Amino acid sequence: MEYTAASLVARVAGDLGPMADEVIADVVQCLRRAVPELWSNPDLVRMTSENIAEHVVGVLTGLEHGIEPTEMDPPAAELERARRLARHGAPVTALLRAFRLGQGVVLDRLLAEMPRLTKDADLVSAASRLLIAMANGYVDDASEQGVMAFQEERDRRLKWRLALVNEAGLRIGTTLDIARTTQELADLALDHFADMVTVDLLDSVIQGHDTPEPGHLVLLRVAQASSTQKGGPEPAAGSGAVHACPDGSVTAQALATGKPSRHTAAPTDPADVVGPHPACSTLVVPLSARGATLGVARFCRHRNPVPFDDEDLFLAQEVAARAAVAIDNARRYTHARSTALTLQRSLLPRRTAEQSAVDVACRYLPAGGQAGVGGDWYDVIPLSGARVALVVGDVVGHGIHAAATMGRLRTAVRTLADIDLPPEELLTHLDDVVIRLSAEASDDPETETAGEIGATCLYAVYDPVDGRCSLARAGHLLPAVVSGDGTVDLLDLPPGAPLGLGGLPFEAAEVDLPEGSLLALYTDGLVEGRDRDIDTGLTLLRHALAQPSASLEAACDTVLQALVPTDRPYDDVALLLARPRALGDHKVAAWDVDADPAAVARARSNASERLAAWGLEELAFLTELVVSELVTNAVRYGRPPIRLRLIRDRSLLCEVSDAGGTTPHLRRARTFDEGGRGLFLVAQLAERWGTRHARQGKTVWAELDGEKHAGISGLDFGP
């Protein structure tokens, strides 16, 4: 039979057709050995085998019937196989190498059959060249279509991965809460590429330490997510569980090396055992940020039979890296906030001091969100003469520096209050303190708040004897007064500049505060907010204060519920409610004293008679001794008018006033000195003593307690 090159090729292809199964087996064997990427994924094994068979049969059929290579259609599933190869991370070179190797196996079988049909070497050569040209045309066309489908899928996967990483940036770290941030990571991974996710953080990290303590690693499961609604398993350790990390486990290796890993075997960590549902694939990715390893995230597949590949591992790394930064931010914020809040609460009074001038109720709420703890404070300071100082202040800024500044200012206010300065003078001295603190901060390059220290303050002194209150403010909001009939008004006080400006005077105002009224001091965090201005807040405050309440504590709750409905307000809130009391005439006795040494005896006698009327005879001797010394000093060194006053409060208060401006000083008398022992004796006998200055004159006072000096008797003193 005479052959042409084309007919010889057709005859060879036709003869090889019945042996197509052998050719297919040879191609499969070759590709399994040379291109293992095509067989590593169970999802691709069946499809690859079917496509090889369709390719071989299609090529032999096309050659037998003389079909042009461009008209030989590759298998319908070939493009889908190329897409799946791209989806599972196989390189495009594997696809091209498979085509060339398969072509080589088929060509070898075809070329081996030609010498059996003809001995014409020229014809065999021509047929071989034709066969190779046709095979190359088919492979080129099929591989081109496969590469295009492969690249389209790669581009789509890349866009998907970038979109997922971008979504991670939007969904993870929406708050500065560690539990919520880790749960956001778990939920994101569950939505897109995992069937179960667990997030464990080192217990030492939760406690605020960057490095774990020596010994076994202890982990806290802070978040997990599983496709339970579709029959997915749950890990042995639930959220909130503390568990040890076994030595040599994949988790321990990830924490030690900081490198992620991919596994197809069941986990070795008991906390991740899921009973009869072993994971077919697991990614273990450490959570590292700013040079510190915080914990580890595990991504598992149970329902999805396709194991994780290297691209999945890389994607998990990118998502985990973003999550780790957000977790570290939340951890640092939580630690700093906890430290500042602890400092703030330690600097605030744990309980108000005992005194009889006012009934008080106080509240402090730290700011929520990213603002953190601030410098708001309140204080109740007992003063001489049964008076009391009420203080509310607000330091500019938030955080530890604001809390520390608040503590220094509160200490300064207490120190200045101890020397009984009038409100306007106290604020003047406090203004100097803030200026000095600002100067110190400006000179310290490590201080973040350099040059930014400022504060507002409201200082009020209430005297229960005359029922009057003296107030001065430094840039602070006006206090509110609730009268006995429920009317709420803001006191009209001189404005006063905020503390830290310097050079500006402060003025005080005096108002009557009868029994049954209520004084409300507060900071701007109570009345200001994102959704309202000060005027709206003040209106709400007036309405809340006007509501009847069973107690001051209940009144505080009513105000906070009306103006701060959430426990995490926009700004710090300090609230101080004070209900004044009055000391009636039956608890106060006063006498004018002549500037004559002979008047000392009458002063002692008057004091003794009053104590007898009050039933305080046990204090008579002690009181007479103190009165004698104080009145004598006023007669000798002071200026008239001289006045003696006794106040029966929690203890007995003895006061001697005169118009002189000279401050008495305590000193130790020498052996042969005739004087100089009076104030020393008063200091020994009194619980407390001191001097307070008024606009005209001064008052020397002593607080007496008979129990401390009950054994003193039988002393004789002069006229």
Image: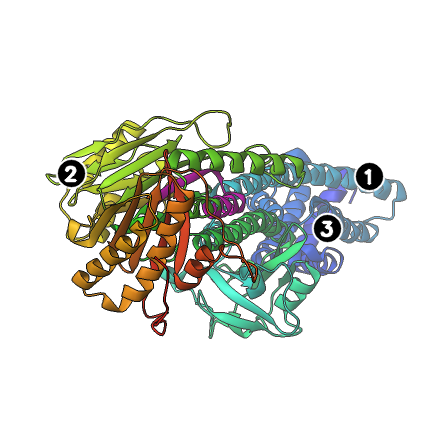
266 relative to 618 in the view: left or right: right
Image depth: mark 3 or mark 1 in front? 3
Residue in the foreground of this view, choosing between 189 and 179: 179
Can you give x and y, in whole percent of width and height, for residue 512 in the image? 21, 36
Question: Under tag 1, what secondary structure?
Answer: helix
In the picture, the disc for residue 102 is 3
Image depth: mark 2 or mark 3 in front? 2
Image depth: mark 2 or mark 1 in front? 2
Residue in the foreground of this view, choosing between 529 and 394: 394
> What residue lies at 44% left-to-right and 59% top-to-bottom?
683
- Amino acid of disc 1: Arg
Can you give x and y, in whole percent of width and height, for residue 99 in the image? 71, 46
Q: Which residues are magenta?
A: 389-411
> Which circle's residue, 3 or 1, is located before the other in the chain?
3
For the question of whether residue 66 can be seen, the reply is no
> What residue lies at 23% left-to-right and 65% top-to-bottom?
616
Whole-number angstrom distance, CA of label 2 to CA of label 1:
112 Å
Q: Residues within 10 Å of mark 3 (few under 14, many from 20)?
A: many
From the image, tell me which residue sits under label 1.
129
> Which circle's residue, 2 or 3, is located before the other in the chain?
3
> What residue lies at 37% left-to-right and 63% top-to-bottom?
717
From the image, tell me which residue sits under label 2.
483
**Residue 153 figure quarter:** top right
Residue in the foreground of this view, choosing between 191 and 576: 576
- The answer to whether the residue labelled 2 contacts the one labelled 3, judged by CB atoms less than 8 Å apart, is no
